[in-house]
Image (cartoon, rainbow, N blue to C red):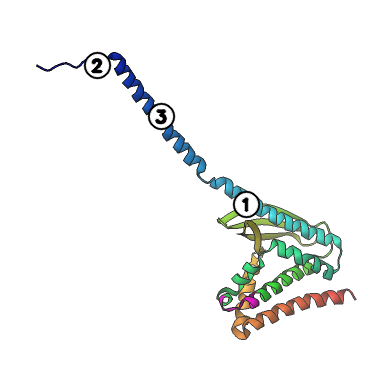
């Protein structure tokens, strides 16, 4: 005959209470872990919006600098001198040089690379100085931005002029060391980098790196010579 086992009702109630408390703690711990994991996940949408805002701010700042330069006066040499540090601040010229030379960049020495970067910075500055003369109510407008990669953003903008109407300007920016900088400008469908790649490729094939430097120096001299003749 089986012997019955007596269990104190109070003990049963205690066991039930312990099981309920343990289940509650396990559930609470799981919920906290899930919420913690969600909170730790990167906010991709928010980060992308912040990056696009920063890139657009970079373009707006560059435009403001250009307007300020035009308001200072018509002398090209003075505009050129003022534009040099502005180009250095807003443009990723080393990246532009590397992309423009394509596979030839790997064959260059460190000193040659730096020399080309310095020359391209001067060329960009003198080109802007030559094209943007006196201020005549020109107005830049930043329209939109698009992320093309985690470190690349494109910004669409316009320049309104009295004589040439509205000019479309499309900026490509690259994120380096936490800062967005311009590495290409597309004007009416024609990109600066695309032109440089074509020209540099032909010159390197014929005259090597020295030919590229000579070509860039010639372009700089042409702009400055025109300015000198205009001031006579």
The answer to whether residue 159 is visible is: no
Q: Earlier in the sequence, mark 2 or mark 3?
A: 2
Q: Name the residue under label 3.
A: 25
**Disc 2/disc 3 C-alpha distance (Å):** 26 Å
Percent x, y of residue 122 = 74, 71
Q: Earlier in the sequence, mark 3 or mark 1?
A: 3
- Residue at (64% x, 69% y) in the render: 94
Q: Name the residue under label 1.
A: 52
Q: Is residue 112 magenta?
A: yes
Quadrant into which the N terminus falls: top left
Element at badge 2? loop
The answer to whether residue 81 is visible is: yes
Q: Residues within 10 Å of mark 2 (few under 14, many from 20)?
A: few
- Determine the image quadrant of residue 63: bottom right
| Residue 164 vs residue 42, the one in the foreground | 42
For marks 1 and 2, give the one nearer the viewer: 2
Region in magenta: 106-113
Percent x, y of residue 92 = 66, 64
Q: In this view, does 116 lie to the left or right of 228?
A: left
- Residue at (51% x, 40% y) in the render: 39
């Amino acid at each position: 005959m089986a012997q019955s086992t007596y269990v104190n009702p109070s003990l049963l109630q205690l066991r039930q209470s312990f099981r309920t408390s343990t289940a509650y703690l396990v559930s609470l711990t799981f919920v906290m872990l899930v919420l913690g994991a969600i909170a730790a996940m990167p906010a991709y949408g928010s980060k992308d919006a912040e990056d696009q805002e920063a890139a657009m701010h970079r373009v707006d700042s560059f435009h403001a600098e250009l307007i300020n330069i035009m308001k200072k006066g018509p002398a090209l040499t003075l505009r050129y001198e003022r534009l040099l540090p502005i180009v250095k601040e807003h443009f990723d010229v080393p990246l532009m040089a590397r992309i423009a030379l394509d596979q030839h960049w790997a064959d260059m020495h460190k000193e040659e690379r730096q020399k080309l970067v310095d020359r391209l910075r001067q060329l960009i500055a003198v080109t802007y100085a030559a094209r943007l003369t006196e201020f005549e109510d020109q107005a830049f407008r930043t329209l939109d931005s698009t992320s093309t990669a985690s470190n690349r953003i494109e910004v669409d903008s316009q320049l309104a002029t009295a004589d040439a109407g509205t000019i479309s300007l499309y900026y490509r920016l690259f994120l380096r060391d936490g800062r967005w900088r311009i590495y290409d400008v597309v004007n009416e469908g024609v990109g600066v980098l695309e032109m440089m790649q074509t020209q540099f490729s032909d010159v390197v094939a014929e005259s090597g790196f020295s030919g590229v430097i000579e070509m860039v120096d010639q372009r700089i001299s042409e702009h400055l010579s025109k300015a000198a003749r205009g001031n006579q």
